[in-house]
């Protein structure tokens, strides 16, 4: 009987290891983004720590395992995240799910691209001073860059002195 339980638990652990690759990415202000890559090319990105075995039950982004994804937010609206899949126009699949409106709300950058472009970027494509963000390359499991607003930079610099 004990041997059966060991075999069953071993199969479960092996299935979990093969089925899912999970990575956590943090910003300087403590935000956590969880990337769960699944077999079959699906990927779930949650703007919080997520440990579940299945797709998240709260707000999340569903995309492919080969996408690059950006999240933007401002200091005045830290729980409103704008999601931009870098290669969206080349056919990458992006689905935004907002099941709990009281939590972090996700918005698709391409639903109102002109508005967000003016809001977040200067004419020379440099970010505006109040923009926070994180860029993740899901295919290679790496953080491309993260940036914080000038106000947060000043606060962090003052804390370290």
Image (spheres, rainbow, N blue to C red):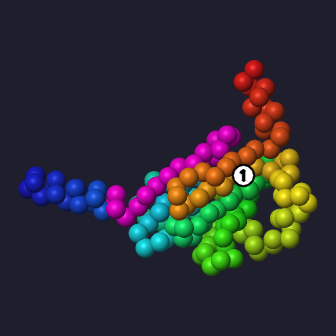
Point out residue 89 in the picture as x, y percentages from the top left corner: 69, 77
Q: Is residue 78 visible?
A: no
91 left or right of 120 in image: left
For disc 1, the marked residue is 133
Q: Using residue 133 as the reference point, say whether residue 129 is left or right of it.
A: right
Residue bounds of the magenta highlight: 16-32
Above or below: residue 157 compared with residue 145: above
Residue 19: percent from left, percent from top? 37, 64
Q: Residue at x 60, y 51 (%)?
A: 143
| Residue at (84% x, 64% y) in the render | 117
Residue 29 on the magenta span: yes
The answer to whether one can see residue 108 in this image is yes
Residue shown at 68%/40% (left/top)?
29
SS state under label 1 = strand
- Residue 5 position, x and y percent, is 16, 56
Q: Residue at x 89, y 58 (%)?
A: 124
The magenta stretch spans residue 19:
yes
Image quarter in which the C terminus is found: top right
In this view of the protein, which residue sits in the foreground, 151 or 103? 151
Q: Quadrant of the N terminus?
A: bottom left
């Amino acid at each position: 009987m004990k041997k059966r339980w060991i075999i069953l638990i071993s199969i479960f652990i092996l299935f979990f290891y093969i089925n899912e690759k999970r990575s956590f990415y943090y910003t300087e202000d403590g935000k956590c983004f969880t990337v769960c890559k699944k077999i079959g090319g699906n990927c779930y990105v949650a703007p919080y720590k997520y440990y579940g075995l299945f797709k998240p039950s709260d707000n999340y982004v569903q995309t492919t395992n080969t996408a690059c994804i950006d999240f933007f937010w401002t200091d005045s609206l830290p729980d409103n995240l704008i999601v931009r899949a870098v290669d969206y126009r080349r056919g990458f699949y992006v689905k935004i799910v907002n099941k709990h409106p009281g939590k972090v709300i996700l918005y698709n950058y391409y639903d109102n691209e002109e508005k967000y472009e003016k809001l977040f970027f200067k004419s020379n494509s440099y970010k505006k001073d109040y923009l926070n963000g994180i860029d993740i390359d899901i295919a290679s499991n790496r953080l491309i860059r993260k940036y914080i607003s000038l106000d947060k930079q000043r606060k962090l610099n003052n804390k370290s002195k």
